[in-house]
Image: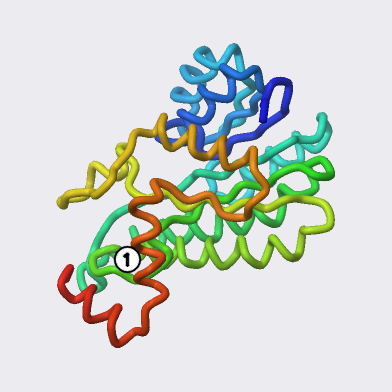
Amino acid sequence: MSFAGQRIWIIGASAGIGAALARALAHEGADLVLSARDATALETLAKDCGGAQIEPLDLAKRDTLKAVSQKLAGTAPFDAIICTAALYDPARVADLDPERAEAMVHVNLLGTLDVARLCPPLIRDGGQLVLFGSVAGYFGLPGGQPYSATKAAINNLAESLAVELAARVRVRLVCPGFVRTRLTEKNAFHMPAAISPEEAAAAVLRGMGKRGFEIHFPRRFTLTIKLLRALPYALSLRLTRRLG
């Protein structure tokens, strides 16, 4: 599938997979709108992307997404809107920082809910709404909260939207494994099958060119976690206790 000439809005574009997607799509000739909290990073990225339009916003501040959505409603419809924005801090439940946990819920879950509510009208018939869940949302692993909980909710949200919007918009759920970004640098453990943001972006674009609902990668890791999820709790919880 060629993305040349396609109009695509990336929310969470300033770093990591979002920035890698922006560069890959610009290389293919897509017409991009880039959003994130960091306006300076967006300006730098836009120069790498042939002068892409930038629209700074913060998913923790509902009015900013609403304002940008209203502005873009007066422009050409999008072929795809991709939301990669997320906060991440790994922690055991007993060690959670309540304020940081609340921030993750606001951005990861409530922010994505706002994207799901406000963005579909901006997408052309047959276009794509691409939401980023995570393999972390497949199963509750020790040390992964509240990030894992928010991603489990997004996985569930995407499933609901795939049915609700089926008549007009194709909803895609992206569930990455470990990707080497500034967020996963916080992990104090070995990340199996970790890949680069560029490899992740390439996997996302391949998936968007196909017709399936879920895009998950790298499969040598994601299929293992899917198997864990499919096991009876008596067995899966016994296995995950070894990780704790």
Residue occupying the point 74% across, 35% down: 79
- The one nearer the camera, 58 or 26, is 26
Q: Is residue 69 above or below residue 34?
A: below
Residue 103, horizontal then vertical, whole percent: 41, 57
**Quadrant location, the N terminus:** top right
Q: Position of residue 75 (x, y in %)?
A: 81, 30
Q: Position of residue 213 (x, y in %)?
A: 62, 55
User: Of helix, strand and loop, which one carries label 1?
Assistant: loop
Q: Is residue 114 left or right of residue 193?
A: right
- Does the image show residue 37? no
Q: Quadrant of the rendered structure where residue 34 is? A: top right
Q: Is residue 235 above or below residue 96?
A: below
- In the rendered image, the quadrant that contains the C terminus is bottom left
Q: Is residue 111 visible?
A: yes
Residue at image position (43%, 47%) is 217
Residue at screen point 34% across, 84% down: 233
* Snapshot colouring: rainbow
Label 1 CA crowd tier, 10 Å (few <14, some 14–19, many 20+): many
Give the side of residue 206 with respect to residue 242, left or right.
right
Rendering quarter of residue 3: top right
Residue that carries the numbered disc 1 in the rendered image: 145
* Residue found 39% across the figure and 56% down from its top: 222
Q: Label 1 amino acid?
A: Gln
Q: Work out whether residue 89 or residue 39 is closer to the camera in this orientation and state it.
A: 89
